[in-house]
Amino acid sequence: MQQYTDIEEEKEYNTLNLGPTHPATHGIFQNVLKMDGEIIVSSEPTIGYIHRAFEKIAEHRPYYQITPLTDRMNYCSSPINNMGWHMTMEKLIGAEIPKRAQYMRIIIMELARIADHIVCNSVIGVDTGALTGFTYVWQDREKIYEVYEEICGARLTTNIGRIGGFERDFNKTTWEKINDALNSIEKRWAEFERLLSRNRIFMDRCIGCGPITAEKALGYGFTGPNLRAAGVDYDVRVMSPYSSYEDFDFTIPVGTNGDTYDRFMVRNTEIWESIKIIRQAMNNLPEGNYHADIPEFYLPPKDDVYTKMEALIYHFKIVMGETDVPKGEVYHCVEGGNGELGFYLVSDGGRTPYRLHFRRPCFIYYQAYPEMIKGAMLSDAILTMSSMNVIAGELDA
Amino acid sequence: MGIELLIFKSILVLVVFTITLTIAAYSTYGERKIAAFLQDRIGPNRAGPFGIFQPVADGGKMFLKEEIIPADASAFLFVLGPSLAMLTALMTGVVIPWGDTLTLNGVEYSLQITDLNIGVLYIFGVVSFGVYGIMIGGWSSNNKFSLLGAIRASAQMISYELAMGLSIVALIMTTGTLSIKEIVDQQATWHWNILYQPLGFLIFMICAFAECNRAPFDLAECETELVGGYHTEYSSMKLGFYLFAEYINMFISSALMASLYFGGYNFPFMNSLGLDQNMVTILGTVVFFGKVFFFIFFFMWIRWTIPRFRYDQLMRLGWQSLIPLAILNILLTGIFTMREELKNWLFN
């Protein structure tokens, strides 16, 4: 890669608007690039191009109505966002979640992680010009979406689960579909890896493209696969286990150079680890209830609502968002598809949050983007962006 | 020149012209179907049975689209660009020998429009002229993405033209002629040049990919970086001309590869089948098109399999790998052809 050096002032640069609508910016990003031919001299990203003020909206919504807002952050793995939000709430109200519900959550979260990584890695392929792998592995993502569909009826913005657990137990078809999805991912992902990961052109394109050192990555606050690619073995699932992740046996892949190829390989390996976790969860699934016993927050069964007065009262209170929550301040984080997804919640005891803040991993990656592409070529910039998997939905802060 | 010959040649020009355009149009269909096959999809299947009228529908759409010339574009050059691309693409088919001679009423008719004794040079000249179409189109649209695409295309063409030329030099050293017809005739039955020039063919093929702007060398129009590359601003049939020109170039490159290295219309045992000369000619033409279609498929197969290069890697491959290899190939060919003299010189 060519090194950027300070060039004399009078040299003519070209300004190139990469985005907001550009086929390679997966979402709405604007980057004003200053170019010296094909070399990027400097770039200025515009943040908040699609600012939707989720945190402010959340301050006017009862707690259970905030889940759909979290869907729309990283829409490639929205179940993780949903689960993270539910767990934050459970932490605030101090609910005890049955093991079965926790294991079910892990299955869903890992499926979402696989879907997220499939998107990211296949799109790296697209951005290097290999479209075939992309259309090939998206059939598996489709299978994962079918699992979501079976559980909650939705596909992209899932709104999956409830505060306290799930709305219903997984049925037989769901288990079959999960099994089917895993089998086909195992088969097809191995093919995808064979297609790209040792391809000479692909390696030449990715190795040394958009690198970041571990120090810098930590300094910016990187988490998730992008930090692990730089060589730091930080994973929320291991560092502060939630939802019984401590019961599972899996490894955290770590890269060395923090470049596009390492990010690609880390994600590849994580897919295999996620499959391992899901298989363990399915084999060791404990018996028990699929939701916590928290009648103030978990909707009673419909039969009871029609026949019992208490159930009707709770139903009414929950739906109207009239259940008060304890005063308090909690931070809960989960390992999202892209990194540490945090929820900082302040409650003053009312029906809506006093203040809510989402820690969005992509927002942080995007801060480092100008530095990472400085001196690189236009093609590298595109590849760096897609390998960091910056999702526009997480940029509206 | 007899009037019969003139009529025959005119008909042949018309036929070659039509066939070239039809094959280019159906290459788009083939491309989409092959891509679909490789990607577990179905591909076009709405227009007619198996979607075979898709190219017609596409062409019709192109003609009916609104013609847009950007306000800041240089209008004359903007129109000249695609015309030039199309013109040069169509001109190359003239020297390709589509078949051997047909004998009708005792008169021999060659299935080649004209047998230039500098056929190879002619093709090179016309093809290198073709880059002007892309350059002018990219520059005149007054769009930065187009300009970047045009710059990439011209740099790529210039670098790869050299290696291509050098790989042909080695071939010409063995054949001793620049006429494509003669080169093809020398490869009668199974004496195909690929057997004598494998390295040369490899270099020629890679350069042909680059000359046609096909993946993995499609930097000039790579949609993930440059939106549409040099034809970002183009619409209607002007865009169609660019796309068409690309497919015609692919067809001509395939025809060239087939005639220079794979024996053209020659096929093994062609003279021992005991067939009439006209029959052999017709069979030969069929075989020739078979070879051409194989190469077109190969082009597509490559495109939908491997990623593309980065600009600097492309330049490095051209200048640091292909050109030295081509020169080495010339040297090896020289040593091989002069082996008797060398032996005498060394051991006496």
Image: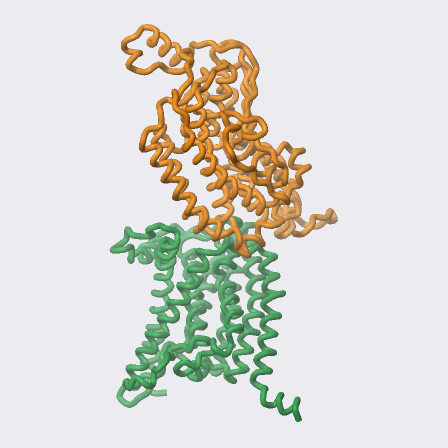
Would residue B151 appear left or right of B59 to someone viewing this image?
right
Asked if residue A278 is positioned above or below residue A36 in the image, the reply reads above
Q: Is residue A137 above or below residue A153?
A: below
Does residue A18 appear in this view? no
> Horizontal placement of B262 versus A237: left or right?
left
Please give the name of the residue rendered at 53% of the width and 72% of the height, measured from the top-left corner: B199
A236, B284: nearer the viewer:
A236
Indicate whether A280 appears above or below B96.
above
Residue B151 quadrant: bottom right
Identify the coloring: by chain
Left or right side of A172 for B197: right
Residue at image coords 47%, 63%: B85
Q: Furthest residue to the bottom?
A: B348
> Quadrant of the rendered structure where residue A256 is?
top right
Place of residue A356 in the rendered image (x, y in percent of width and height, measured from the top left) = 54, 19
Residue at the extreme left: B49
Percent x, y of residue A182 = 40, 40
Q: Quadrant of residue B324?
A: bottom right
In depth, the one of B194 and A282 nearer the eye is A282
Residue situated in front as seen by the camera: A52 or B18: A52
Report which colour depicts chain B: green
Residue drawn 52% across the image and 42% down it: A269
Tell how many labels.
0
Q: Residue B333, percent across and down?
A: 57, 80
Q: Position of residue A279 (x, y in %)?
A: 43, 36
Task: Tell me the shade of chain A.
Answer: orange
Q: Quadrant of the C terminus of chain A?
A: top right
Q: Is residue A156 visible?
A: yes
Q: Residue at x 43, y 69 (%)?
A: B254
